[in-house]
Image (spheres, coloured by chain):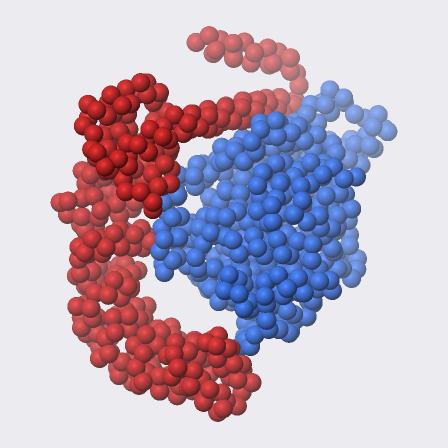
Amino acid sequence: MSYFIEFYQYVIFFYATLIALFYLTLSILGYFNIIRNLLQFSRKDEQMLLNYPKIAPGISVVAPAYNEEVIIVDSVNSLLGLNYKNFEVIIVNDGSKDKTLELLIENFNLVEVPFAYIEKVNCKPVKRIFRSTNSAYDKLTVVDKVNGGTKADAMNAGVNVAQYDYFINTDVDCILANDTLTKIILPVLDSEKQVIAVGATMRMVNGCEIDHGTITNIRPPKRIIPTFQETEYLRSYLVAKMGWSVINAVPNISGGFGLFDRSVVVASGGFDPLSHAEDMDMTIRMIAYMRDNNKSYRILQIPHTLCWTEGPPNLKVLARQRTRWGRGLLQIFFVHRKFMFNRRYGRLGWLIMPYAFLFELMAPLVEIFGFLFLIFLLFTMQINFSTFWLMLLYVYLIGVGVSLLTISFDIMIKKLYKNFSEYLKLMFFSSIEAFIYHPFIVFFSIRGYFQFLTRRNFKWGAMTRQGFSRVETNVK
Amino acid sequence: MAILYYLKYYYYYLQSQFVGYPFIIKLTVFLVLIFIFIYVFSMFRSVFLHRKERRHTSFYKRLKKHFDRKFEDIFYNSKTYSDLELRELVEEDIDLVTKVYHKKVFTDYVVDFVERFQHTKVMNIENYQGVLIVFAIIEFWSKRVVSNSSKKRRIALRSLEDLNIGLTGSTIMRSTYHKNNSLRKHARATLIKHDKNNPYQFLESDFDEDFNKLDEVRLHYFFSEKYEEGVLPQLIRWVKLTQNEDFKIYLISEIGFFQQKDAAPMLYEMLLKDDQTDPVNCGIIESLGKLNYFKAESYIIENFEFYNRKLQLSAINSLSILHTSTALDFLTQVYFLLDDYSLKIHTAQAISRFGKKGVQALYQMNQQAVLDFDKKVFDQFSYQIG
């Protein structure tokens, strides 16, 4: 027994140290990547794309909507106001039961139009296509379809209707920065290899002041849960993905916001409607398609904050979200197990999948088992408290250290919050995240794994909308 | 030296505290120290970056308050001031812009200021240049554009471009062989505007070995400026020279865009020879359409059925631009022979561009249509034309 206890302690130590080494390496790579990105393009490059639309690639902005009557009008107005010449906005009404479609028709002068629809990727039937009679909304197309149960199905309908070579995958609860399209397309143009996907930083819109779909004042969230998520998202984008991007090993372009090469998405079969992590699933299948066809590719991540999303405001909604992510993550390893350690798939096989398996999928299990083991050691009075506190400090500092590094990266890119006290707030929340927020994430992830393994019939789950058109107040 | 002494002291102190402990514990202590350092460093760095940004913002606001009125009077005055007069006008302000960050912020301010009035007022270029000389802005950036740091060079190149002054062929030339891709290519493109000796020298050598779409955007920008000045050379001369296919395709498309009709016979000759790749042929077909080279029409129509999908797409685009009744007849016939639905949509779209004749053709085709999809296509484009 004592050998097992010692062995297990060494396993935990080396597991934590490996995570620390990975994150340190990603931080260093991410830092230099951020510096390179900041220098690479100027305002003039963006201006050239705006002044010469004939050479600027067209981009379709595809956003599925299911029961989004609270925010749909502001969202569409925000998307139509993007500063770019060649783009279209495609809203996919995924069988909404509320007034989503009626509001769109009323506010944007929509009429049903004849449309030669080609189903390039599989999805539930499209019933009608709407365009506006008002030239101010000539970039808008609304697709009305039978509900497919998941965002992936709705995205596929949008991909089928999109006319441009690139499309943005986003949600209607996301507000995009005005210069999103110029910023996200420039790295695609400045690459010698085919860029199949680009991600950018997303943050919480929950505390921001918004006027009819436009952010007028950027602030961190007021509520506790979204504030924890703010730093969590920043860590994921500015450290992890920016680091992975240097070695072309970005594991996932977020479903909340990402630019994709439409031809590669279509060739890969589109988004999987059965997947609960359709973003990671799509990224993996795109990589597999390129590798199977011996094509060089790049998946990029840019550091700029281009998308603000409404984060779960309370534990109940967070639970739904993270449980789904847990189901989705485990599902990825079942569906795509053939890529694991498969040299044929390059970095996907020997780096991305093993890393995600060991340090994303297994992490909650290691943590929960470690916690139970600790309780056991406490009850059997086998704990050496001086080394216990040292190890606890070590694990705690990994998280807090990387979080603070992330916040400094964020300020380096662009100081979005006006007051430094708002960054101090993020720093404070980072320091208590390990005790308050993280245990819930572990629990919800494991719940997701359990749900997947016991094969319950899942629904995507409703996001409780607050709406954009008012300043967030401290509502209990 | 003193710091080293203290570091050694604390290192030995920690070592003494953990004498006899397993290696794992010592390793953990070391890693904890690393992370404490990261924690403290990040904290200080965040504060430093915040203060730097605040300093820049407050200086910018100060410049705006101080110079808005003054610069509006100077830059947009019909009277050209001499150097001495300008110096007298801004004498008390020169000390305001002395440090490095002052000059950077001042540059941003001037660029924004000029942008504000670019469509409403006519600038007195000599006064503008004079002010920049008095504040030593041109001198500052000119030194940096030839510095050893690629980062400084890139920012300096951009700043001088934004200021639209101070760049010469000789200052840019030093960056045209730099190992940094971004700097090198930006410098080569900028040379077209600023070099009086041989501005197109890099077009002779495929522009750059890493030629990409962003280079196309930048070159297009400079070509457009030359075109507006009426001095854009015939791009066909580099089409024949280049070995880089992407560069060749780009030049061919630019020939069509800038309506260099003299190049059309040569492009047609290349198409007839048929010794280049499909992407190049696609570019040639589309450009011949844009150049309204009607001689190519019959060749395109005759060979359409032998073309692959991409070439067929280019042919359809080209025929719709040529806009002849022969082209219209051909497109209406070929529509029903296509089995690629995307190509059908493209063809219908091309037909719709023929105006009233196109509308008529679509109506007649709708009467003939058997497939539901075809009916939807014709309904769609008939609706779009109205």
Residue beneath the point at 43% across and 41% down:
A37
x, y percentage for residue B146?
Answer: 25, 32
The image shows residue B276, relative to residue A33, as above or below, that is below
Residue A244 versus residue B78: which sits nearer the camera? Answer: B78
Q: Colour of chain A?
A: blue
Residue beneath the point at 52% across and 33% down:
A415
Residue A110 versus residue B107: which sits nearer the camera? Answer: A110
Which quadrant: the N terminus of chain B?
Answer: top left
Residue beneath the point at 36% across and 53% down:
A51
* One can see residue B49 in this view: yes
Residue B325 versus residue B159: which sits nearer the camera? Answer: B325
Give the left or right position of residue B288, taking residue A70 as reference. Answer: left
x, y percentage for residue A84?
Answer: 45, 54
Q: Colour of chain B?
A: red
Q: Residue furthest right?
A: A379
Residue beneath the point at 36% across and 60% down:
A54
